[in-house]
Image: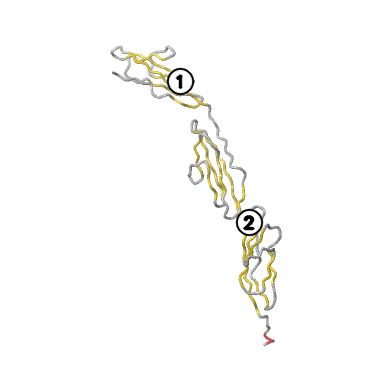
């Protein structure tokens, strides 16, 4: 027996503009609106469509097809305002859930993206049904408060130097595990401190202290 089919049901986007094709080789075509004679039929609204065809032997075949349509949906994408992160911190960007495809600046295709380094990041989100695309971008910078213990220096023997890490930090940790804002240096060596601020950022700096006997040439 001859098989006849209009094809699979169709899901498309508004405005609908498709053409149904009943196939060639038939002597007669009768579509759902009563109009006949054409192999093809223009569809501009969603609905159920059928056609009856007649072959050379006078046999008739009928098939029905459903056309469904959806209004184009524009994805709502907001990566948020430009942001700053601490050195070594990570930030998770989320392009939003939905029936979408995702394309990030590095060609990755997940809904989310993990930021490890400063830079400009962007994503294009596309509606899977109607193909509407929206792009958003965000600039991520690194927080840097210019923390410094100062330059390496030399002090005279039997003298001290008070190292000051600065006020306003939540915690201090020196190389000897002391935790004050200041540290008294009286021997040669490398001194370092790690501070933590209210944003959760940690900063570290070090300074080398050298010792000189400070004797002038005249004293020899």
- Residue occupied by mark 2: 144
Could you say which disc has been placed on residue 209 in the image?
Answer: none
Horizontal placement of 26 versus 102: left or right?
Answer: left
Q: Nearer the viewer, residue 108 or 132?
A: 108
Q: Nearer the viewer, residue 38 or 200?
A: 200
Q: Are marks 1 and 2 in contact (CB under 8 Å)?
A: no
Horizontal placement of 96 versus 50: left or right?
Answer: right
Q: Residues within 10 Å of mark 2 (few under 14, many from 20)?
A: few
Q: Residue at x 49, y 27 (%)?
A: 13
Q: Residue at x 37, y 16 (%)?
A: 62
List x then y, in percent, for residue 194: 63, 61
Q: Quadrant of the C terminus?
A: bottom right
Of tags 1 and 2, the one toward the viewer is: 2
- Residue occupied by mark 1: 43
In which image quadrant can residue 184 be found? bottom right
Q: Is residue 193 above or below residue 31?
A: below
Mark with earlier residue (1, 2): 1
Horizontal placement of 151 versus 52: left or right?
Answer: right
As measured in the structure, the alpha-carbon distance from the residue carrying label 1 to the one carrying label 2 is: 61 Å
Q: Quadrant of the N terminus?
A: top left
In which image quadrant can residue 167 be found? bottom right
- Secondary element under disc 2, as helix, strand or loop, is loop
List x then y, in percent, for residue 82: 61, 46
List x then y, in percent, for residue 202: 62, 57
In which image quadrant can residue 58 be found? top left
Q: Residues within 10 Å of mark 1 (few under 14, many from 20)?
A: some
């Amino acid at each position: 027996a001859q098989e006849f089919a209009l094809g699979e049901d169709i899901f498309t986007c508004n405005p609908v503009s498709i053409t149904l094709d009943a196939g060639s080789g038939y002597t007669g075509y009768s579509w759902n609106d009563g109009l006949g004679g054409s192999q093809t039929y223009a569809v501009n609204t969603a609905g159920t469509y059928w056609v009856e065809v007649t072959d050379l032997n006078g046999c008739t075949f009928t098939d029905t097809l459903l056309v469904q349509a959806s209004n184009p949906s524009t994805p709502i994408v907001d990566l948020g305002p430009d942001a700053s992160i601490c050195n070594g911190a990570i930030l998770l960007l989320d392009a939003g859930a939905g029936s979408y495809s995702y394309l990030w600046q590095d060609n990755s295709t997940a809904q989310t993206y993990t930021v490890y380094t400063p830079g400009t990041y962007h994503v294009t989100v596309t509606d899977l049904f109607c193909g509407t695309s929206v792009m958003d971008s965000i600039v991520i910078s690194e927080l840097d408060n210019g923390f410094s213990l100062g330059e390496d220096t030399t002090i005279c023997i039997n003298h001290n130097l008070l190292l000051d890490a600065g006020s306003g930090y939540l915690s201090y940790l020196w190389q000897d595990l002391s935790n004050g804002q200041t540290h008294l240096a009286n021997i040669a060596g490398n001194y370092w401190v790690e501070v933590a601020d209210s944003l959760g950022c940690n900063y570290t700096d070090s300074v080398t202290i050298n010792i000189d006997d400070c004797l002038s040439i005249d004293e020899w």
